[in-house]
Amino acid sequence: MIFHNSLISWYLHNKRDLPWRTTTNPYPIWLSEIMLQQTRVAQGLPYFLSFTTAFPTVFDLANANEEQVLKLWQGLGYYSRARNLHKTAQHIAFDLNGVFPDNYKDLLNLKGVGEYTAAAIASFAYNEVIPVVDGNVFRVLSRYFDIESDIALTATKKEFTALAAALIPKDNPALFNQAIMEFGALQCVPKNPDCSVCVFKDSCVALQKKKVDQLPIKSKKLKVKNRFFNYLVVQDEENQTLIQKRTHKGIWHNLYEFPLIETEKEEGFDYISNAITDDFFKTNTITSILELNDKIIIHKLSHQHLHIKFWEIKIKGKVDKGINKEVLKSFPFPIVIHNFIEKD
């Protein structure tokens, strides 16, 4: 009782004014939750506003083509979220007549909606009494109760969900869930929280034991894989270039890129020029090859680091299926390629 009363009181005095908190409409709530998976609010908010402007209803999103959705999503990363978002919008619009499932169990059947997202939508849109457990909740509860269970384990998720369920007030679950997540985002932050101003400074067990910086406990991540991408930026005599769609599964699925040579390690001019001569542009004479990077670009993803170089390839005549720079900018690209195009 003391915990949730103090938490909710703190929230009402400190909460951020966010557009998805002023509605019980499941569409913007679902949209925000998908966008904020592995994304900070400050980064996700402009995308949310762009999406709700372009697609004010689930029918608008469903009727868009995938490239429109990916273009608006460009820069948010984890692009499978956007593809699943679009497919789920089509399912809700065309199969469910625009009506979202109204409970946790049925929400779990939606593509791209896991336990956390289903709980959030059920709670915030329908006030279902179900705890929302994300990284913020893990952190707050592990510190307040001094829980040393490894949050990378499935059993720990069940442990924290049960604890949150015991704490949640039955008369206002949505407010409690918003409050505990906001508390983790603003006050009980991962590094160097200011515990001197915390409403729980007299009752937090980790603070009393001087263990705040040690919790929550999470086992180490898998080793990051390094990949080496060499992008070929073609320029023909009409200033046209070439792009291709990444159709295979993996990173950046269905986004566009320049022709790519992936290598086992960083390679220089001789290797790339030989590879280009052997395998690319056999119908056009290459007049020059130039490395465009001052230094290699390292683009970090959660499970791999991409070491990227851009190479300018000038050719005689006109390239087959070439496009000009204005058309080029209309396609959805990974953010690292988008930034290169915009800077060029």
Image (cartoon, helix red, strand yellow):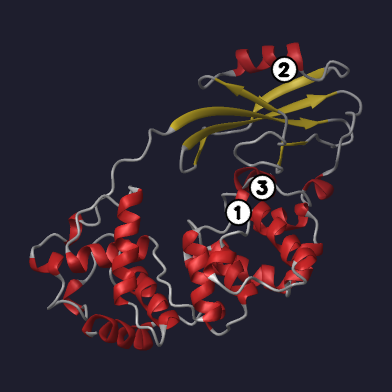
Q: Distance between the residues labelled 3 and 2?
A: 23 Å
Q: Which residue is drawn at 89% across and 33% down?
A: 321
Image position, residue 323 (x, y; %): 86, 40
Nearer the observer: mark 1 or 3; the answer is 1
Mark 3 falls on what kind of element? helix
How crowded pointer 1 is (Cα within 10 Å; few <14, some 14-19, many 20+) is rated as some
* First-in-chain label (1 vs 2): 1
Q: On screen, 62 above or below 331?
A: below
Q: What residue type is labelled 1?
A: Arg
Mark 3 vs 2, N-terminal side: 2
SS for dot 2: helix
Residue placed most toward the observer, 282 or 119: 119
Decide: few, some or many residues near mark 3? Use Cα within 10 Å; few <14, some 14-19, many ≥20. some
Residue to which mark 2 is pinned: 276
**Could you say which is closer to the camera, residue 93 or residue 72?**
93
Rendered-image quadrant of the C terminus: top right
Q: Position of residue 40 (x, y in %)?
A: 47, 63
Q: Which amino acid does label 2 sit on?
A: Ile
45 to 80, vertically: above or below: below
Q: In this view, does 67 lie to the left or right of 17?
A: right
Residues 105 and 235: in front is 105
Can see residue 76?
yes
- Residue drawn at (31%, 88%), measured in percent from left and top? 9
Residue in view at x 60 percent, y 54 percent: 81
Residue 86 screen position, x and y as percent: 71, 58
Residue indicated by mark 3:
338
The residue that disc 1 covers is 81
Q: In this view, does 248 lie to the left or right of 293?
A: right
Q: In this view, does 32 lie to the left or right of 194?
A: right
